[in-house]
Image (cartoon, rainbow, N blue to C red):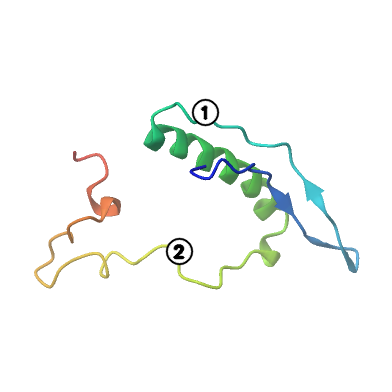
């Protein structure tokens, strides 16, 4: 979004011994909207597209890099939330 790029979700599932190509409609965004709110809205739209595909082909879904850290990784040695980790402080601001 920062670069003004087009967001075009594309899915390439393995189907019937080949690969299907499904290009979804562009997800538009408003560069003038508050950045955090617009980013959240756009990410939710992207996830909505991929959620349907993941539900249909769960065996094809994989992540090569960790996406979510464990709760233990986000805490300090004394059990407090590490500063800057909103995953542990969501809703408490």
* In-image side of 59 versus 92 (left or right): right
Q: Residue 3 in the image: x percent, y percent?
A: 53, 45
Q: Residue 69 in the image: x percent, y percent?
A: 36, 66
* In-image side of 12 versus 75 (left or right): right
Say which residue appears at 85% left-offset and 57% top-offset.
20
Residue reaching furthest to the left: 78
Q: Of residues 18 and 35, which is closer to you in this image?
A: 35
* Whether residue 51 is situated above or below residue 63 in the rendered picture: above
Quadrant containing the C terminus is top left
Q: Residue 51 in the image: x percent, y percent?
A: 62, 48
* In-image side of 34 versus 20 (left or right): left
Report which quarter residue 57 is drawn in.
bottom right
Say which residue appears at 27% left-offset and 70% top-offset.
73
Secondary structure beneath dot 1 equals loop
Q: Of residues 33 and 88, which is closer to you in this image?
A: 33
Q: Residue 92 in the image: x percent, y percent?
A: 19, 40
Q: Which mark is residue 30?
A: 1
Q: Which mark is residue 43?
A: none
Alpha carbon separation for disc pair 1 and 2? 27 Å
Residue reaching furthest to the front: 3
Q: Of residues 88 and 11, which is closer to you in this image?
A: 11
Say which residue appears at 69% left-offset and 37% top-offset.
26
Q: Which mark is residue 67?
A: 2
Q: Earlier in the sequence, mark 1 or mark 2?
A: 1
């Amino acid at each position: 979004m920062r670069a003004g790029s087009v967001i075009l979700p594309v899915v390439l599932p393995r189907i019937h011994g080949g690969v299907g190509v499904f290009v979804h409609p562009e997800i538009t965004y408003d560069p003038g909207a508050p950045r955090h709110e617009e980013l959240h809205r756009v990410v939710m739209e992207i996830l909505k597209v991929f959620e349907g595909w993941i539900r249909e082909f769960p065996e094809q879904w994989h992540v090569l890099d960790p996406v979510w850290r464990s709760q233990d990784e986000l805490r300090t040695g004394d059990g407090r939330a590490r500063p800057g980790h909103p995953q542990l402080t969501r809703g408490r601001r």
